[in-house]
């Protein structure tokens, strides 16, 4: 095994990635020091790498405990596709295959073994593992989906409890537990049940910056809206419905509209479900219409949209279900269609529950979901506050933030609201407080004598809905609390008192009529789509090549290359193996396996483009420049600019923002072009700037590749892009 001076090199060599995601490096370093670890990261956060890379760098076998056969097979397939020797043992193998697998382990040929807990702890396997430990060593145990150990989690597995034995039988072998489930209770349970030794705990933010969240009203034309989302996206998506009937009905309609869609629910036979799932993962069909039965353990990273046709039952479920979108980190869209009918249906279902306590919990969860759906605050703020995480808002990637509803000062109203809570002695819920504020003659209010309070009737000027909007916003902003055990009662906190004492002002986002917003959002979108069209065409070509290669090996397409890697290929258009190797997601093994085919496709495309497009591009130079003249920086570009002004390097900004360095460089290049204060000298040394400038003068607005060819290989695309921003700015008018 070669020794790697830097972990980054190992990362590039085995997995093809250029940099670690936030937290990964620390985790891997701790793992290499044989620490026990508890890792809590959202779906798509990159948990697998945290045990896979140490497994490759350490001596001996790493045993990965995973609850689902399909997950194991997918992960092993993906590893093998990177040239890594991984294997699984589960009930899909026959006796002979298991023996062969064990042989290969004992010869030290297998670095990672995936296995289900009941197998691992079975009478047959543990003695074998003892032999492994003596002969080649056990590098570590990784317990995936570790929340299964807890009864408080959402899918408790009794067999996970037995995993404690590992800790005693192999006392010196480090254990790493990984999960995407957040609550404190489950965390403590994992540590205790697995007997982790002073574990190093990593809790990543649950924010998923690449997901766009939106809520749309459910109307008569909802079907058309859904069709539009499907057609715009052109890639895979899931549509969740509340009932089997709805699933069947919607699948049928979509098929009639020419969409490749399949159903998934508990009413189908096992074979049908398995086959539909596989066809979805392999991209044979675009859309899976499903009940919530679908999704657990589905290893499909490139789902580009998740639509909730009906209101989800609670926010935790919504987070998990919508979280199946964009696991590859690329942009994806999460939409809820919300109508009052849904509320009635769910209320009906809740009433069917026999246990009053369960009913109470369920209705409280329903209220939280409705708060989310009706909320005017940043959707992330609302979701993450549910997980106890404070998110400042203004994410720039949800409907509420993008539609930039006018923010109004509602301090006076907030003072009225909160002092009404105080005067009612923090013993009532939101509806009651609003009734008092609006001077309702409700019997209960009269009985409590609350019609005599000074706050009675001082809020008649606002409607019930307006007060609710304020109340919800106060909750989301943490300016008032709500009890969570049973009936929700409003409670004041120190921040509430600051508002009442006028030490803190309160702003809330007030909705405006929708059509305008949709129109501007649409025209922005169309503009972007136009610019992206060229890249998109190549991307599509690369996708079909990927599908061909994947089908030939019977693996899901993303195992060949992820969407993000294909997209980079489409953007950077590498023409040589050397250039191809630089693309994030291309490791040594995949370079050898697929490089030539992809380069051939890209070259062919560029040839075609040159024939038809280059003259046209030269002509349109001025109009392109005009576009940019009026352009102003986007929110995300401004965030980058802000950090850059604070003297952070590109890498540091990327790390902080959880984006790729290339993305940050693109921001900076565009900012330079827009004449924003970016000091180019900090990015590219002046003498190199000069050389690149000369190349641009000589080559003109051709592709980056042409400029690169002119310059020779010692210049990077990033440097050229940055100088090109400046060059374009100067060559305008
Ligand atoms: P999780 O298990 O946390 O849901 P995965 O381990 O499946 O997430 O990772 C999600 C995606 O992110 C995968 O496509 C994986 O290859 C990719 N990924 C992980 N780490 C990195 C990295 N450092 N750079 C780029 N992509 C990464
Ligand atoms: Zn937002």
Image (spheres, rainbow, N blue to C red):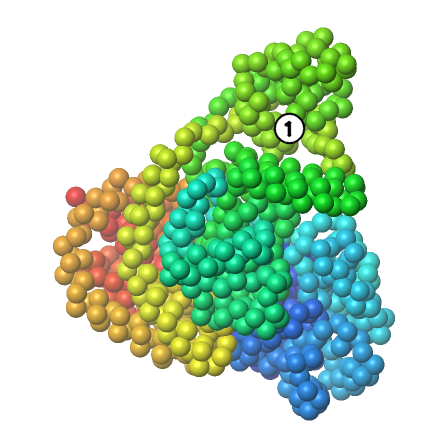
Q: Which residue is mark 1?
A: 479
Residue farthest right in this picture: 168
Taking depth in this image into account, of 644 and 454 the one nearest to the observer is 454
- State whether label 1 is within 8 Å of ligand 2: no
**Residue 56, placed above or below residue 523:** below
**Quarter of the figure with the C terminus:** top left
Answer yes or no: is residue 384 visible. no
- Determine whether 723 is above or below 261 in the image: above
Does the image show residue 719? yes
What residue do we see at 46% from left, 62% from top?
Answer: 261
Residue 409 left/right relative to 602: right
**Label 1: element kind:** loop
Q: Quadrant of the N terminus?
A: bottom right
Residue 602 image point, x, y percent = 31, 71
Q: Residues within 10 Å of mark 1 (few under 14, many from 20)?
A: many
Q: Residue at x 65, y 40 (%)?
A: 347
x and y percentages locating residue 534 in the rendered image: 28, 60
**Residue 374: x and y, percent?**
54, 35
In this picture, residue 162 sits left or right of residue 310: right
Quadrant in the picture for residue 447: top right
Which residue is more in the foreground, 604 or 359?
359
Q: Nearer the viewer, residue 163 or 698?
A: 163
Residue 117, picture quadrant: bottom right
531 or 628, nearer to the observer? 531
**Which residue: 55% across, 25% down?**
465
Q: How many numbered markers are drawn?
A: 1
Residue 373 appears left or right of 357:
left
What percent of the width, then of the height, locates residue 50? 62, 65
Position of residue 500 relative to residue 578, above or below, is: above
Residue drawn at the location 68% of the way across and 22% of the way down: 432
């Amino acid at each position: 095994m070669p020794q790697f001076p830097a972990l980054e090199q190992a990362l590039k060599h085995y997995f093809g990635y250029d940099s670690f995601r936030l937290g990964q490096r620390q985790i891997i370093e701790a793992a290499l020091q044989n620490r026990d670890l508890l890792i809590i990261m959202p779906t798509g956060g990159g948990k697998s790498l945290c045990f896979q890379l140490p497994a490759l760098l350490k001596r001996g076998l790493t045993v990965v405990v995973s609850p689902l056969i399909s997950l194991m097979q997918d992960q092993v397939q993906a590893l093998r596709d990177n040239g890594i020797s991984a294997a699984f043992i589960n009930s899909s193998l026959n006796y002979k295959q298991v023996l062969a697998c064990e042989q290969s382990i004992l010869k030290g040929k297998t670095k990672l073994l995936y296995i289900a807990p009941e197998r691992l702890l079975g009478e047959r396997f543990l003695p074998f593992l003892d032999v492994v430990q003596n002969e080649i060593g056990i590098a570590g145990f990784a317990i995936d989906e570790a929340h299964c150990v807890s009864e408080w989690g959402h899918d408790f597995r009794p067999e996970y409890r037995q995993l404690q034995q590992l800790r005693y039988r192999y006392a010196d072998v480090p254990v790493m537990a990984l999960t995407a489930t957040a609550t404190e209770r489950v965390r403590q349970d994992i540590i205790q049940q697995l007997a982790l030794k002073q574990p190093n705990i990593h809790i990543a933010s649950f924010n998923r910056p690449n997901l766009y969240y939106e809520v749309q009203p459910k109307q008569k034309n909802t079907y058309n809206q859904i069709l539009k989302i499907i057609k715009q996206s052109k890639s895979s998506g899931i549509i969740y419905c509340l009932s089997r009937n709805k699933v069947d009905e919607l699948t049928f309609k979509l098929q009639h509209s020419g969409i490749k869609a399949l159903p998934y629910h508990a009413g189908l036979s096992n074979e049908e479900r398995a086959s539909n799932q596989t066809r979805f993962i392999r991209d044979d069909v675009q859309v899976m219409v499903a009940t919530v039965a679908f999704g657990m353990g589905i290893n499909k990273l490139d789902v580009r949209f998740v639509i909730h046709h009906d209101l989800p039952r609670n926010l935790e479920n919504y987070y998990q279900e919508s979280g199946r979108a964009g696991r590859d980190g690329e942009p994806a869209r999460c939409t809820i269609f919300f109508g009052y009918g849904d509320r009635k249906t769910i209320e009906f279902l809740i009433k069917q529950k026999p246990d009053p306590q369960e009913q109470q919990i369920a209705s409280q969860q329903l209220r939280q979901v409705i708060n989310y759906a009706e909320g005017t605050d940043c959707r992330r703020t609302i979701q993450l506050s549910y997980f106890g995480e404070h998110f400042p808002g203004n994410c720039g990637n949800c409907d509420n933030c993008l539609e930039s509803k006018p923010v109004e000062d509602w301090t006076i109203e907030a003072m009225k609201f909160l002092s009404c809570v105080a005067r009612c002695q923090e013993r009532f819920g939101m509806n009651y407080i609003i009734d008092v504020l609006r001077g309702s003659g409700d019997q209960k209010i009269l009985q409590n004598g609350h019609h005599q309070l000074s706050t009675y009737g001082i809020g008649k000027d606002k409607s019930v809905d307006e007060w609710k909007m304020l109340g919800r916003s106060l909750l989301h902003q943490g300016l008032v609390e709500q009890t969570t055990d049973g009936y929700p009662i409003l409670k004041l906190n120190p921040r509430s008192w600051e508002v009442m004492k006028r030490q803190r002002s309160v702003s809330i986002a007030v909705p405006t009529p929708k059509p305008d917003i949709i129109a501007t959002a649409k025209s922005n979108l169309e503009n972007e789509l136009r610019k992206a069209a060229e890249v998109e065409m190549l991307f599509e070509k690369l996708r079909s090549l990927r599908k061909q290669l994947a089908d030939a090996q019977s693996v899901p397409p993303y195992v060949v290359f992820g969407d993000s890697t294909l997209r980079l290929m489409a953007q950077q258009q590498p023409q040589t193996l050397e250039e191809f190797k630089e693309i994030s997601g291309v490791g040594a093994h995949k370079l050898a396996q697929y490089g030539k085919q992809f380069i051939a496709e890209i070259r062919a495309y560029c040839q075609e483009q040159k024939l038809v497009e280059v003259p046209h591009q030269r002509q349109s130079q001025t109009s392109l420049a005009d576009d940019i003249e009026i352009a102003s920086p986007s929110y995300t570009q401004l965030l980058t600019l802000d950090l850059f002004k604070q003297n952070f390097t590109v890498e540091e900004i990327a790390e902080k923002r959880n984006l790729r360095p290339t993305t940050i460089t693109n921001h900076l290049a565009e900012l330079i072009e827009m004449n924003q204060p970016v000091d180019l000298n900090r990015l590219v040394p002046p003498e190199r700037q000069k050389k690149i400038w000369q190349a641009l003068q000589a080559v003109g607005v051709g592709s980056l590749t042409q400029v690169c060819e002119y310059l020779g290989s010692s210049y990077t695309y990033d440097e050229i892009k940055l100088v090109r921003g400046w060059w374009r700015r100067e060559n305008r008018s």
